[in-house]
Amino acid sequence: MTSVIPGDFAATKDYLFSLKSRGVKFGIDRMRLLCESLGHPERAAPCIHIAGTNGKGSVAAMLDSIFHAAGWRTGLYTSPHLVRLGERVQVDRRALSDAEIVAFTNELRVHAESLGAINPDDFPSFFEFMTGAAFLHFMRSRVDISILEVGLGGRLDATNVVTPEISVISSIGLDHCEILGDTVEKIVVEKAGIIKPGRPVVLGRLPPGAMRVARQIAAERGCEVTAVQDEFGDAIADYPVTNMECDYQRWNAATATLVARRMPAAWRLTPSVVARGLKHVNWPGRWQRISLGGKRLILDASHNVEGAEVLDANLARLRAQTGERPVIIAGTLGAGRAAALMPVIARHAREIHLVVPHQNRATGYDELETHIPADFKGRILRDTVENAFPLPDSCAIGEPEDTILVTGSIYLIGEVLERMQNDRPNEGRLQDW
């Protein structure tokens, strides 16, 4: 296995990649052992734990902003990262530096090797290393509260060693079906694995079947449930306002608002604090608008069936606003996601540029093309991120004043942002799943 050299970030990345290349390890027994070896840093501060098919990262970012608006020191753990590995672990929205990642990796490796010497199966995975680093960083930074996003599922996720103040399920849709199950009812069972006995539960907008199962699990564990549709109804005009665009972000804002309402009064999360926090959310890659050389660029991750349905509505709204069809750059991971996304973008695009993200599971050009309906009249081009964004301040696709949407895999969004920053290679190989 690759050695980690003190202060050498390149060697550290190689070491972490060697852990990732061992494959994904589900189950929380290894994480429990690691936490015990570290002195249980996961218990150092209260936390909010968030699972969900879509929206969990946005809800986490909104809650971070709300608690920060109330004057609290916050820890935020999310995945995957967009460009830099350190984005996953943030205190007051400052990401881990390269030097901190090196230091934490060296420290964690000592514990990991001790555990692995007793039982090789107990050697932590890449994601468990990052989770352990987050717990240690939050403890040493003396955060007042940490907000933890589940990596995948919930029941067997490494983050599920915590006992949260509130458990949150942001949404349920059909994604990662080969791991989590092929119905929303099966999937919500895995997500609801984060629900702890006697702890409040907040549910976002869930399909009826998933809502029924989630409520049943919460009742069995003696948990009081608050659900978005119970509190806010179905009219989006009645939902909280946020600086993040699109109706689905108002659904997420409602979920975050209910979490704030469920926190004890001592946290000072008053309606005015919540409103202020929701108006200053920083969460890139979700209908993010950027002006680039006179062109209007929108970056929006849409990586599954539920996301494609939301994108369809957003594109219809965009066309109504501009009176034009956008140019769309798209790439996915997996044929099923391509099957959901390609017909949607074909309904709205003037022309489509297909790209293949630099990920092992990326969908190839041939597969992407098979899912574009035969009646699409615009141009279809095979392209690359490097060709589309040759310089940090330029986009080679489209004409001046065009609207250009980049959508599909969140990893694709990260590659575009890296091209625009252009300061070092993307850390995309250190991604999950």
Image (spheres, rainbow, N blue to C red):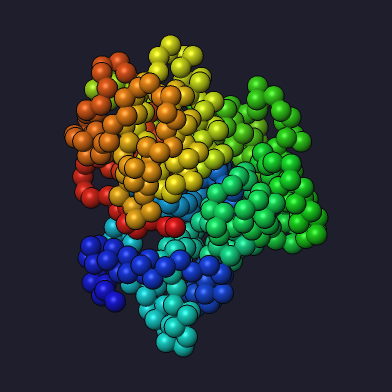
How many marks can you see?
0
Residue drawn 78% across the image and 60% down it = 221
- Asked whether 239 or 69 is in front, the reply is 239
Residue 271 position by quadrant = top right
Residue drawn 48% across the image and 30% down it = 344
> Horizontally, is 353 left or right of 108 in the view?
left
> Where is residue 370 shown, x and y percent of the image?
40, 38
Image quadrant for the N terminus?
bottom left
Visible in this render: residue 285? no
> Where is residue 347 shown, x and y percent of the image?
46, 24
- Asked whether 1 or 31 is in front, the reply is 1
> Where is residue 70 shown, x and y percent of the image?
56, 40
As drawn, which residue projects farthest toward the top?
323
Residue drawn 25% across the image and 18% down it = 399
As drawn, which residue projects farthest toward the left?
391
> Horizontally, is 410 left or right of 61 in the view?
left
- Asked whether 277 or 219 is in front, the reply is 219
- Asked whether 210 or 256 is in front, the reply is 210
Q: Is residue 409 above or below residue 45?
A: above
Residue drawn 40% across the image and 18% down it = 325
Image quadrant for the C terminus?
bottom left
> Where is residue 98 shown, x and y percent of the image?
29, 58
As drawn, which residue projects farthest toward the front?
374
> Horizontally, is 425 left or right of 224 in the view?
left
> Horizontally, is 231 left or right of 17 in the view?
right
Q: Is residue 1 above or below residue 23?
A: below
Visible in this render: residue 337? yes
